[in-house]
Amino acid sequence: MTEARPALPEDELFRAEIVAWLDAHLCGDYEAVRHRGGPGDEEADPVLRRRWEQELARGGWTCVGWPKAEGGRGLSIAQQVIFHEEYARAGGPGRMGHIGETLLGPSLIAWGTPEQKARFLPGIRAGTEFWCQGYSEPNAGSDLANVQTRCWQEADGSWRVQGQKIWTSLAHESDWIFVVARCVPGSKGSKGLAFLLLPLRQPGISIRPIRQMAGGNEFNEVFFDGAVAEAGHIVGAPGEGWKIAMGLLEFERGLSTLGQQMHFLHEFELVLDAMRRSGRTHDAQLRQRVAQAWCGLRAMRYNALRVLADRADAGLRREALIYKHYWSNWHRELGKLAMDVLGPEADVVSDDPLIRRLQQLFFFSRADTIYAGTNEIQLNLIAERGLGLPREPRPAAA
Amino acid sequence: MHASEDQILIRDAAESFLGDVSSSAAVRAAMARPEGHDPEVWARIRSELGWCGLAIPEALGGLGLGAPELVLLLEQAGRHLLCAPFVSTVCLAANLLQQVADESAQARLLPLIADGRLQATAAMPATPDWASSAASLRAMRTASGWQLDGEIARIPDAGTAGLLLVLARVDGAAQPALFALDPSTHGLQLEALPTWDATRRFHRATFTAVALTTDARIDAPARSADGLKRAAALAQLYLAAEALGCAQQCLDLTVAYVATRQQFGRPVGSFQAVKHRCAEMMIRIESARSGVVGAAQLAATAADTTSLAMDCAMARVLTLDTQFYCAQEAIQLHGGVGFTWEYDPQLYFKRAQAGSHWFGTADALRAEISEALLS
C-alpha cells in the first residue's frame, strides 16, 4: 500500500538497515515465533521469544528510543516509527521486554536515581531482566487510585509490601515487578502512594495464574505477604507514587501504533485467507464487513500518522484521545468477523494454525476493550477532555 | 500528516468567512430563494476568495493546490451547509475536466472556472462510478456533429449553471463520451426537483434530439477510462470532506446544547447516558477525519488509480455512516427541539439522507472495496 508521508533520505537508509537486519536474523529457529506473541497470543513460546530479545539486544535493536547516554540508540521519532513499522511488517515476535523498555525504563531515566539506572537499565537493554506492572487490584480497576496494597519502611530502610495485585500480564514470565502501594496509612485516592521495585522471586510473593476464556493464562494475581523491596528501590519520594505511575503511562504515546497497525493488517489478511479457504468469498454480508474492517484499518493508519505528525501536545489532541477506543473495538469486531468467516468450523477447537490463531483473536480481543481503560472510561475521558462536558464526580483525596 | 501553515490559513479564512455569510439564518434565507443560493455570496466566493481555482493548475489560471487544501475548504462548507454551486462547479465539473477532457477543452474552460467567470456542473450519479450516468443518455453521430437523447436523473445547480458536462454512451464504444453544452441548448429540458434537502438544488434533465457540434465532445479517449475512475474517486473524497463538516457541526451543536440544557438540576451533558453518546460521535468523526486527510494526501501523490479509488471510497464510507449517525444523534440528544424546524439538526439530517446515495451508497462502496480486496 502506498504511503502518504514524506521521508528524508537518512530515514530511508535507516529503513533499509532495519529491514536487512531483520531479514538476516529473524529466520532459522525464530521462524516459529514470526507474527507470534501479539495481543491475545502473548504466551506463545516465551523461552524462544526471550532468546529473541537477546538477539535483538546484540543487534542494538532494543530500547531504540532511549537516549544514547542511557545506553539506547537515540533514534528520532520518525526513525522509531520506521523501526516499529518494519519490525511488525517482518512479523517480529511480540516484545517480551516491552514493559521494561517502554514503561519502566523511560520512568527511571526521568525520575530514577543514578544507582537505580545503573542497576536496572542494562538488564532491560540486554533482554535479560523482564518486568511486569503491578497497578490494578481487585478493588482498584477503573478506579485505579483506590489502591489498598500497603507498604511501610523497616528500620533498615527496606520496604515491606502487603496486599494483592491482579491482571498482571506475564508475571510468571517476569523477574521484577513495579508496584504502586499505599505508604501513608489512612490516605485515600491518589495521595499517599509509593512506587516500589520488587524482585518477583522471593518468599513474600506468590503468583496465581488467572485462566482466561480461551484457556490461556497470560494474566495473574500477585500476592504480597511482607514482600521486600530494597531501601534504594523506591522511585520518587514516598507519596509521589501516583505521579510516577501516571507519568509512566504517558510514555506509551503512540510510537508503536504504526507497528500495531501493521500487525492488525497481518491479522486482517489472515481473515481474508480464511474466507478464501472456507469458500465464503461470495457472501455479500461478509464482504460488507470485510470492507468495513479494511476501512477501519486505513483510518487507524492515517490516525496514527496524524498523532505522530504533531507530538508536542499529543496527550490533548483529539486523534490521540480516540485511538484506544477505536483500535480496541475494531480489533474485537475483527475477531467476530473471523469467526463468522470460518462458520461452524469456528466452534471446533482446532490444531490448524490459521483457525487457532483466529479463535484466539476472537476470545482475547474481548479483553482489548477492558484493559488499559475500559470503553466506558475511554468515553468519559473523550467526553470530558475532548468535548469539555462536565466531569464525573470523583472522590476527594484525603 | 499535519496541516501546513498555508493550509491552516485556508481553513481559518473559510471558517471565518462562512461563519459570517452562511450562518443558520443565511442558510435558511438561501433555501427560500428560487436559485437556492445567495448570488452575492457566490460572487464573492468566485472573485474575492478565488476558491474555484484552488485545485486548478497554475498554468490554467488556478492556484495549483490540490486535494489536501480543497478538503479543508469543503469541510467548512459542509459544516456551515454552504448553499452555493461550489461543489457542482469545482468538485464535479472542474474535476471531470481535469481528469477526462482533452487539452484544448481544458485550456478553454478551466481558466474560466478558475477566475470565477464560469459556473459549471455535471451529473451526480447514484452509483460509485460516473460512467453509469451515461447509461440513460445516448449520443449518436450526425452529419453535423452529435445528437443526444435520453435523460439524466440528477444534476446539481443546473438551473444557474453556464455550462453542463454530460457523459453519454456511444453505440459500439466501451467508454462513454463527455460533452460540454449550454444548459439552454434547444431540446434540453431541465425540471427542478423540490428536494427535502433544500440546501442543494437538483434538476432532472431530459434530452430530446439535442443537436451538438462536433467540438462539443471534449473527452480525451486515451485517458478517459482511467480519468473517469480518478475523477469519481476525487468526487467521493470531496463529498466525504463535506459530509465530515456536517457531522462535526452536528456534534458541536449537540455539545453546546447538552452542556447548557438543565434537567434534574444539572446539565444533561453531565449524564453518562448523554456524554458517552457525544464521545461516540467524536470517535467516529475523528477517525473519519483521519481517513479524509489521509486519502487527500494520497491524492496529492502519484498514487495508482486503484489505491486512490480504494482510499477515497474508504473516506466516503466512513463519512457517510458518520454523517447520518451524527445527524440522528443530534436530533435525539436535542430532545423535543431536535425535530423542530427552528433548530438546525433537521437541516443536517436532510442533507445526510440526501447525500447518502450521491456517488453510491456506503453499501455499494463497500461492495467495490471488497471486490478489490478479494479479487
Image (cartoon, rainbow, N blue to C red):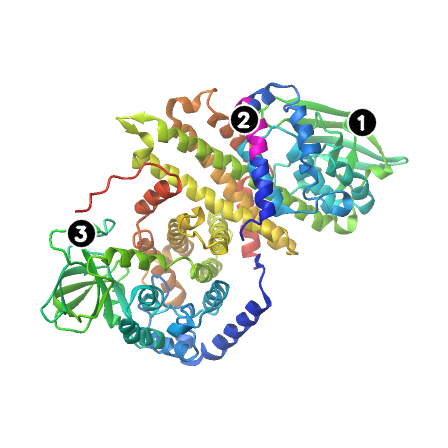
Q: Is residue B21 magenta?
A: yes
Vertical position of residue A339 compared to residue A110: above or below:
above
At which x and y percent is residue A12? 57, 68
- What residue would you read off at disc 1? B185
Residue under disc 1 on the same chain as residue under disc 3: no
Query: In the figure, residue B274 lies in which quadrant?
Result: top left
The numbered disc on residue A139 is 3
- What residue would you read off at disc 2? B23
Q: Amino acid at mark 3?
A: Asn
Residue under disc 2 on the same chain as residue under disc 3: no
Q: Residue at x 25, y 49 (%)?
A: A142
The N terminus of chain A is located in which quarter?
bottom right
- For marks 2 and 3, give the CA distance: 51 Å
Mark 2 is surrounded, within 10 Å at the Cα level, by few (under 14), some (14 to 19) or many (20 or more) other residues, namely some
Secondary structure beneath disc 3? loop
Q: Amino acid at mark 2?
A: Ser
